[in-house]
Amino acid sequence: MKATAKQTPKLKALFNDSLATDLQKEFKLDNLHQSPRLEKIVVSAGLGRSQGDKRMFEVATNTLAKITGQQPNRTIARKSIAGFKLREGSEIGLKVTLRGDRMYEFLDRLINIVIPRLRDFHGVPKKSFDGSGNYSLGFKEQSVFPELSFEEVSTPHGLQVSIITTSSSDEHARALLAGLGLPFEKENK
């Protein structure tokens, strides 16, 4: 039996072939390895309001597993907050951390399939960087992901996608994400 060669994800090949050297030249970096790169992508669903609802956790677990290809981990509250009716140790959400090829494949689907399906979309906001080169993007409901059937989106919940880069500046991270094809909104003049 022949072993099949695993195909490199499209965005990973783009980064390795040209984008890394372009970023090195643009920012006048000494070494190719100093150019910003993706470290991981964290996809999470906070279910604070439906804290005790087992069905909601099942729906969110199914959603995250289908769109990422990995089983999610449950997030636990670290301390009690009476104003939010939150107890220490209670399950408040789910998250999946993507690295390597799965990370690039997920980002490719996000950029080329999911984001174009959004209604009245004019680009992702440029202000969603955290000051440390990481970018966060939120979805009000999971219905924009084509991996999910109509029955699976009948119980809507939100999702958060955090893209963590090795860059320490937002400018470098924005250039990396724009080079990978993330459509940022145009400047209003």
Image (cartoon, rainbow, N blue to C red):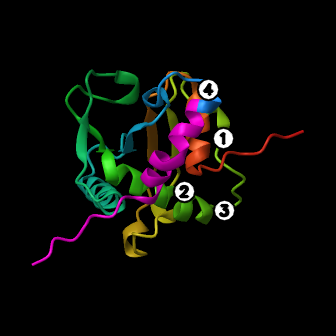
CB-based contact (under 8 Å), mark 1 and mark 3: no
Q: Amino acid at mark 1?
A: Pro
Q: Secondary structure at mark 1?
A: loop
Q: Is residue 50 in the magenta section? A: no
Magenta residue span: 1-24
Whichever of labels 1 and 3 marks the residue nearer the N terminus, that label is: 3
Which of labels 2 and 4 is toward the front?
4
Q: Secondary structure at mark 2?
A: helix
Residue appearing at x 59%, y 45% in the figure = 179
Q: Is residue 64 above or below residue 19?
A: below
Name the residue carrying label 3.
119
How far from the left and from the top, in percent, is residue 94? 30, 44
Observer-nearest residue: 103 or 26? 26
Whichever of labels 4 and 3 marks the residue nearer the N terminus, that label is: 4
Quarter of the image for residue 23 reads top right
Q: Quadrant of the C terminus?
A: top right
Residue 65's label in the rendered image is: none
Name the residue carrying label 1.
125
122 sits left or right of 105 in the view: right
Spatial CA span between label 2 and label 4: 24 Å
34 sits left or right of 184 in the view: left
Residue appearing at x 54%, y 38% in the figure = 21
**What is the magenta segment's predominant secondary structure?**
helix
Q: Quadrant of the N terminus?
A: bottom left
Q: Amino acid at mark 2?
A: Ile
Name the residue carrying label 4.
27
How far from the left and from the top, in percent, is residue 93? 31, 42
Residue 111's label in the rendered image is: 2
Spatial CA span between label 4 and label 1: 23 Å
